[in-house]
Image: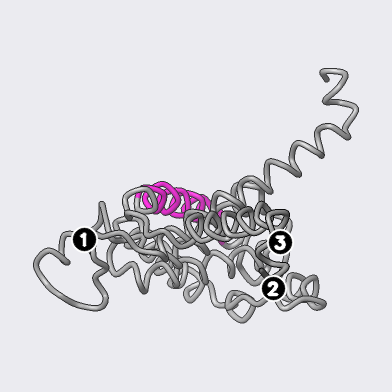
Amino acid sequence: MSSADTPASRPLTQWTQSAIAGWDRFWFTPAAPHTLSLIRILAGGMLLYTHLVWALDLMNFLGPNAWITADVSRELHSDSYAWSYLWYVESPAVIWTLHVLALAVFALFTAGCATRITSVLAFLITVSYSHRLIGAQYGLDQVNAMLAMYLMIGASGAAYSVDSWLAKRHNHWLLPKEQPAVSTNVAIRLIQLHMCVIYLFGGIGKLRGDMWWDGS
């Protein structure tokens, strides 16, 4: 009998095998698309709403004489790998055109239309606005960007969507099937873990603050 098969080593071996199996189940069990698709509708709606808000005073946010100009925004990101296509646009007409196109992408993404494409575009647009509008972002905008990133990993358009309606009539790679998928589970797990981290550090921040303890 080898040392690995001794009675003393069996509990450790069983625990290791159980841990590996649990890890595999957690990440790689195919998941139905309905939960992720519902998140797509809610997150896409928030992306559409928050970017509609910028339109109320678009030139003061993104115009050539904005409160924070493109040059200042780019300089503030000079030590990072951040990038935004909005840094290179000054014409009000072009800015408005790009903004309307962005809203159209968010609307299509929310409706689940060509989600394999619009999910990626929604994420890139969200990040570009986030990098350009430094100083005007809140926690909601950061959560929106996080959700947009994970929604393009899984089949977020496989249910409750235009894609799912079309997929029942046509077989095309752009139309995800309404069936369990590993990528869908991975996307959901990443969202869950990211939210746990947000609440963990939010709780730690409150525990360290005097205002939390004195009730003010």
Task: Give me the residue at 26% from left, 75% from top.
Answer: 174
The quarter of the picture where the C terminus appears is top right
**Label 3's element?**
loop
Q: Earlier in the sequence, mark 1 or mark 2?
A: 2
Q: Which residues are magenta?
A: 38-58
Prevailing SS of the magenta stretch: helix
Q: Can you identify the residue that label 2 sits on?
A: 70
Q: Is residue 114 above or below residue 14?
A: below
Q: Can you identify the residue that label 3 sits on?
A: 134
Q: Amino acid at mark 1?
A: Ser
Q: Amino acid at mark 3?
A: Ile
Tell me, yes or no, whether the two marked residues, 1 and 3, touch with CB atoms within 8 Å.
no
Image location (x, y in percent) of residue 203? 75, 36
Nearer the observer: mark 1 or 3; the answer is 1
Per the image, is 159 magenta?
A: no
Task: Give me the residue at 73% from left, 54% from top.
Answer: 8
